[in-house]
């Protein structure tokens, strides 16, 4: 549970971010995305039952939110408004697919509880991780993405990039080490 | 133990490392965040009205060839139209002369005069011309 003072500060921060994003500041919108992405992914995946579809829905919802930000009442918090938008878009998608629709067990808009693995990763960890990832050499970033996210084997990556498998694994080792080192102070 | 320097014989690099669930989650989310950021920037750019110098910068390269092509097309169309007008005027003048001759011949009452007015006067000049040539 969040502390009340921190919650207030966080809400004020979010209002400021919304205001800046409304004026076209991409960094502010990015900060809003970073803040709500984990919860949005969980909600979308619960609704659609598929990770890839969930990612598309989340992207669609954020872009729709960006488009409609001028319509958001400045006194209303962004989170619940955004999650209602996401949920409606998801329901429309389900209807369009003509899947037999039953009301999903979606947590109410104000409290999007992420799944345990997502919940374990707080905002500070994500922010640090993003910085460490951005600082990686492009080749190492590509290799770690292909291996850890897309599930490619070292040999496949080597063939794709014209490297030896040992070289790929070395790059992978270096990338993972940099990322873990950046997170180490925040992890138990 | 592997070091920061690449050693192809290091046994640690002979097989793939074990998957890391935490890294996977963070990387996957980060990739989606980057995707959204790029799409959002594109959307914002599309929404901002472009000033005139923006259009010039964007389409400056295409403006010259398009202008040249448009000028050529306009010249061809204009030329054709002027030529058509001139042809039409010449045709009208010829028709006017012919009808005046015809009217005169018909008024004279001679069949030979009417024939001369329609197909030209009877002459042997063309025979002489062929012989001389």
Image (cartoon, coloured by chain):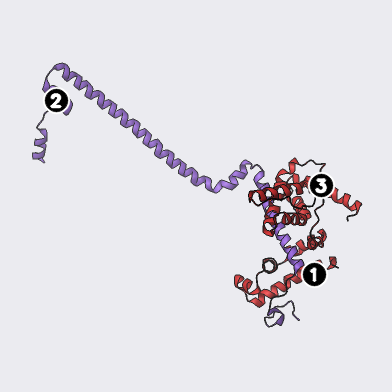
Chain colored red: A
What residue is at 60 percent from the left and 70 percent from the top?
A: A160
Q: How far, Cα to Cα, is label 3 from label 1?
A: 32 Å
Nearer the observer, B104 or B8: B8
Residue at mark 2: B115
Q: Chain of mark 2?
A: B
Counting residues from the N terminus, which is met first, the one under dot 3 or under dot 1?
3
Q: Residues within 10 Å of mark 3 (few under 14, many from 20)?
A: some
B72 vs A154: above or below: above
Name the quadrant containing residue A76.
top right
Q: Are marks 3 and 1 on the same chain?
A: yes
Q: How far, Cα to Cα, is label 1 from label 2?
A: 112 Å
User: Residue A8: where, in percent of width, then height?
Assistant: 88, 49
Nearer the observer, B85 or B13: B13
* A6 horizontally vs B104: left or right: right
Q: Chain of mark 3?
A: A
* A56 horizontally vs B106: left or right: right
Residue at mark 3: A16
Tag 3, which secondary structure?
helix
Q: Which mark is residue A30?
A: none
User: Residue B92: where, in percent of width, then height?
Assistant: 29, 26
The answer to whether the residues at label 3 and label 1 have Cβ atoms under 8 Å apart is: no
User: Residue B74: where, in percent of width, then height?
Assistant: 43, 38
Residue at mark 1: A181
Asked if residue A63 shows in the view, the reply is no
Q: How far, Cα to Cα, is label 3 from label 2?
A: 100 Å
User: Residue A62: where, in percent of width, then height?
Assistant: 72, 50
Q: Chain of mark 1?
A: A
Chain colored purple: B
Asked if residue B94 shows in the view, the reply is yes
Tag 2, which secondary structure?
helix
């Amino acid at each position: 549970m969040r502390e009340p003072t921190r919650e207030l500060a966080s809400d004020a921060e979010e209002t400021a971010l919304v205001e800046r994003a409304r004026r076209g500041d991409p960094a502010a919108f990015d900060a809003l995305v970073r803040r709500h992405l984990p919860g949005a992914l969980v909600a979308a995946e619960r609704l659609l039952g598929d990770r890839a579809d969930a990612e598309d829905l989340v992207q669609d919802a954020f872009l729709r939110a960006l488009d409609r930000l001028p319509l958001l009442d400045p006194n209303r918090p962004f989170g619940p408004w955004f999650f209602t938008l996401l949920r409606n878009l998801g329901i429309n998608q389900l209807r369009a697919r003509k899947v037999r629709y039953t009301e999903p067990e979606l947590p109410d808009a104000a409290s999007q509880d992420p799944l345990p693995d997502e919940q374990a990763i707080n905002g500070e960890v994500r922010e640090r991780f993003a910085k460490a990832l951005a600082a990686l050499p492009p080749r190492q970033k590509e290799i770690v993405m292909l291996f850890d996210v897309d599930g490619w084997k070292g040999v496949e990556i080597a063939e794709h990039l014209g490297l030896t498998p040992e070289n790929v694994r070395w790059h992978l080792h270096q990338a993972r080490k940099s990322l873990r080192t950046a997170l180490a102070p925040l992890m138990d | 133990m592997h070091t920061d320097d690449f050693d192809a014989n290091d046994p640690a690099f002979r097989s793939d490392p074990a998957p890391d669930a935490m890294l996977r989650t963070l990387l996957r989310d980060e990739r989606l965040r980057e995707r959204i950021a790029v799409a959002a920037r594109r959307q914002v750019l599309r929404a901002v009205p472009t000033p005139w110098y923006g259009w010039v910068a964007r389409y400056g390269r295409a403006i010259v060839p398009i202008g040249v092509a448009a000028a050529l097309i306009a010249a061809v169309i204009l030329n054709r139209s002027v030529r058509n007008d001139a042809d039409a005027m010449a045709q009208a003048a010829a028709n006017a002369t012919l009808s005046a001759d015809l009217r005169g011949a018909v008024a004279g009452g001679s069949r030979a005069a009417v024939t001369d007015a329609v197909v030209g006067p009877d002459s042997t000049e063309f025979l002489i011309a062929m012989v001389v040539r």
